Image (spheres, rainbow, N blue to C red):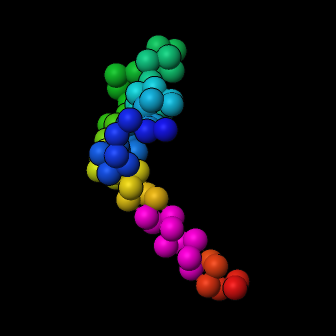
Amino acid sequence: MLTREPSAISVLEVVEALEGPLETSVCDSERSAGCSRSGACAAAPLWAKATGALREVFATTTLDQLAGSQQVMDERVQGVSG
């Protein structure tokens, strides 16, 4: 049961409630501690940018939108197989 309307809950909120903060997994604090390139890695800013883009998509997509998209896809599949 939801305490707010699906249109008021972002996918990011759900992901972070279930998994914790969405962070750059490749260069997170645990891995970077043992990385010889920590602080001097050309890929780190790329991963940070990609994570930022993913956060933005998740933050601007609501459960209501996601459910609506799924309903449209389900109807297409039923139309093809039915």
Q: Is residue 14 magenta?
A: no
Q: Is residue 69 magenta?
A: yes
Residue lying furthest right in this view?
81
Identify which residue is drawn at 53% across, 72% down: 73
Residue 15 image position (x, y, % from top left): 46, 37
Instruction: Answer with the quarter of the image where residue 77 lies.
Output: bottom right
* 79 relative position to 55: left or right: right
Instruction: Answer with the quarter of the image where residue 12 lies.
Output: top left
Magenta range is 68-76
Looking at the picture, does residue 73 appear above or below residue 57? below
Residue 36 image position (x, y, % from top left): 47, 19
Residue 69 image position (x, y, % from top left): 45, 66
- Counting every numbered tag in the picture gives 0
Observer able to see residue 50? no
* 5 relative position to 37: left or right: left
Observer able to see residue 61? yes
> Of residues 41 and 7, which is closer to you in this image?
7
Identify which residue is drawn at 40% across, 45% down: 11
Dominant SS of magenta comes to: helix
Identify which residue is drawn at 51% across, 30% down: 19
Identify which residue is drawn at 38% across, 35% down: 3
* 73 relative position to 54: left or right: right
Looking at the picture, does residue 7 appear above or below residue 14? below
Instruction: Answer with the quarter of the image where residue 50 lies.
Output: top left
Looking at the picture, does residue 80 appear above or below residue 14? below
Q: Quadrant of the C terminus?
A: bottom right
Residue 20 image position (x, y, % from top left): 46, 26
